[in-house]
Each structure stands twice: as structure tokens, then as C-alpha cells.
Image (spheres, rainbow, N blue to C red):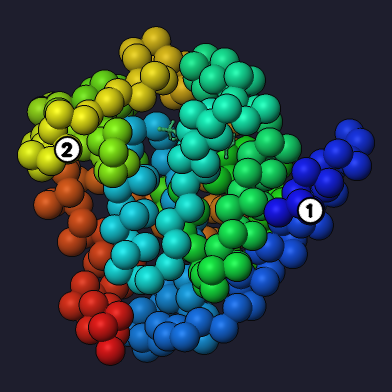
Amino acid sequence: MAAVPRLFRSSSSAPSFSLIRRSLSSVAAAQSPKPHQSNASSTIPAGRNVQWVFLGCPGVGKGTYASRLSDLLGVPHIATGDLVREELSSSGPLSKELVEIVNQGKLVSDEIIINLLSKRLEMGEVNGESGFILDGFPRTVRQAEILDEVTDIDLVVNLKLPESVLVEKCLGRRICGQCGKNFNVATINVKGENGNPDITMAPLPPPPQCASKLITRSDDTEAIIKERLHVYDEKSQPVEGFYRDQGKLLEFNLPGGIPESWPKLLEALNLDDNEVKQYATA
Ligand code: ADP
């Protein structure tokens, strides 16, 4: 851990990314006890666990689907938004700066985010993690280039929903202050435009033990959501092109809520829920 602050203290305008390089390559090289080797699944590399990225606008559901897939595939789900929120709720030196950035709907600097990700990867390395599903990283082309320099990404899943649905979903988002699970109180019924089908999503209510502990993210207000969507268009959409050019981008239009979307996503990923579950318990 001590290496992380040292890395950035010694850096000038161009920080060294040796730590993230070391962290990411050792995560990639770590021997998985049970690497999935399905010959049916071209999205899963042979001999090691998956290294995937989830892209998509705020509120699209990256966290929900990335977390389900991480359970299914036995790899860590690493969400840089969670790392930022953990840091800002601590009384660490960065917390004041981060609150301001996040509550304006802006992006945290590449340097800070890479520092937080490096620490998270180091911790995973110590705990013997292998593979990952990244959610919310990379969010700028510079972050994507850095990631590219340090490890191989197998697949990039780009989740999509119309903007009106994204705003409603963010406004309805609730988090259990105790267990950290995400829920949604919004009932979404949006007419399809330009020949696209209507989108209906039932609320995702919390279980009784979480119902009294729900909190709303401070950046889930209409004005901040709109700013985050604007920042996504400007800074993060080019990341889609970066991976499209590499032939790694899987575009996935969510057809509705979890019951409609999950089986279709598995199909698009060439994953068989039962087959992977059997593998995971073998
Ligand atoms: P969203 O719902 O907008 O996708 P996240 O939970 O992923 O939100 O991120 C919350 C906030 O954390 C972002 O608005 C941004 O300020 C910061 N953040 C998260 N990941 C990154 C990143 N890769 N680069 C810069 N800032 C980030």
C-alpha cells in the first residue's frame, strides 16, 4: 500500500503508471484455481479468468449487470464509482475535493482514479483475486489507453437505454445504507421512438431488512444527472469508439428491466446460466 502514495508524490506532470501496470499484470497472470474453459463461450478466454469492461451512461445498469456477471463468473466486480464514494465518505485527505467534483457531475482526474484503482487491485492481489469486470473505468480515452498499455481486455460491453429512461432510473435509484445493494423505486413506461419498442421496467423494491435504510446518492438529482449525461457524451462516448476500432465492443440495447434483459444479455455473451453455475460449483 505504501507504494501508492509514493508513486504519485514522486510524479511530476506525467505520473508514472508502473504501479497500475504491476497490479494489472499480476492480476492477469495470477493462476486462477478454476479458470472457465467453456468451448461454447467465445467471450471467455481459455486458461484465465475474464477481463471485461462495462460501459454505458449513468443509470443504465452497469453496476447491476456487472455484479450479476461477476457472481456468475467468479471474478471481482470493480466499480470506480464505488471506490470514489468510499473515499469521499472517509475522512481521508481527498474526501473534500471528491465531494465537490462528484456533486457537480464532473469526472475525477485520471490521476486520482488510477490511484484508487491501483490500491483496489493491490488489495485484490493480496487476496488472490484473478480476472475482473470493470464498471465505470475507463471513462476517458486516456484511461483506456493506460489500461491498454498494462493489460489485455477481452470484451467491452456497452449497455444502452434512451436518455429519458436514464434520468428516471437515476432519480428512482436507492441504496441500502447498510449492505450497499442497489434498488429502484421508479416504474418506467416509455414509448419507443423511431420504430424502437416501448420500454417498461418494474421497480426493484428492497427486501424488508433494507427498506428502512435506503439512501439516495447525492449526485442523483435531476440537474446533476443531466450534467453527468453531458459529461458522458463529451468524455466517455469516445471510449466506445476506441474499443469499437479494436473490434472488442459488444453493443447491447436493454430491452426492459432485469427479467427481460438478463437472459438476453447472457445470450449475447454466449453464456449459459446453468452451465456457468455448474462450473462454479464443480
Ligand atoms: P454513474 O452512475 O454516473 O455511472 P458512478 O458510480 O460510476 O456513476 O461514478 C460516480 C462518480 O464517480 C462519477 O460521476 C465521477 O465523478 C466519479 N468517477 C467514477 N469513475 C470514474 C472514472 N473512471 N474517471 C473519473 N471519474 C470517475
Numbered label attached to residue 200: none
- Residue sitting at the far top: 223
Between the C-alphas of marks 2 and 1, the distance is: 38 Å
Please give the name of the residue rendered at 38% of the width and 71% of the height, measured from the top-left corner. 74
Compared with residue 125, is residue 105 higher up or lower down, i.e. above or below?
above
Could you tell me residue 111's position as x and y percent?
73, 37
Compared with residue 140, is residue 20 higher up or lower down, i.e. above or below?
below
Q: Nearer the viewer, residue 244 or 182?
A: 182
- Residue sitting at the far front: 91
Tag 1 residue: 3
Please give the name of the residue rendered at 22% of the width and 25% of the height, measured from the top-left corner. 172
The quadrant of the rendering that contains the N terminus is bottom right
Label 1 CB-ligand 1 distance < 8 A: no
Crowd around label 1: few <14 · some 14–19 · many ≥20 (10 Å): few
Q: Nearer the viewer, residue 150 or 103?
A: 103
Could you tell me residue 58's position as x and y percent?
40, 32
User: Going from the N terminus, do you reach mark 2 or mark 1 first?
Assistant: 1
Can the viewer see residue 26?
Answer: yes
Crowd around label 2: few <14 · some 14–19 · many ≥20 (10 Å): some
In this image, 40 relative to 206: left or right?
right
Quadrant housing residue 177 = top left
Could you tell me residue 104's position as x and y percent?
52, 14
**Residue type indicated by callout 2:** Cys
The quadrant of the rendering that contains the C terminus is bottom left
Q: Nearer the viewer, residue 161 or 151?
A: 151
Could you tell me residue 208's position as x and y percent?
8, 39
In this image, 93 relative to 100: left or right?
right
**Residue type indicated by callout 1:** Ala
Q: Nearer the viewer, residue 86 or 66?
A: 86
Label 2 close to label 1 by CB (< 8 Å): no
Tag 2 residue: 210
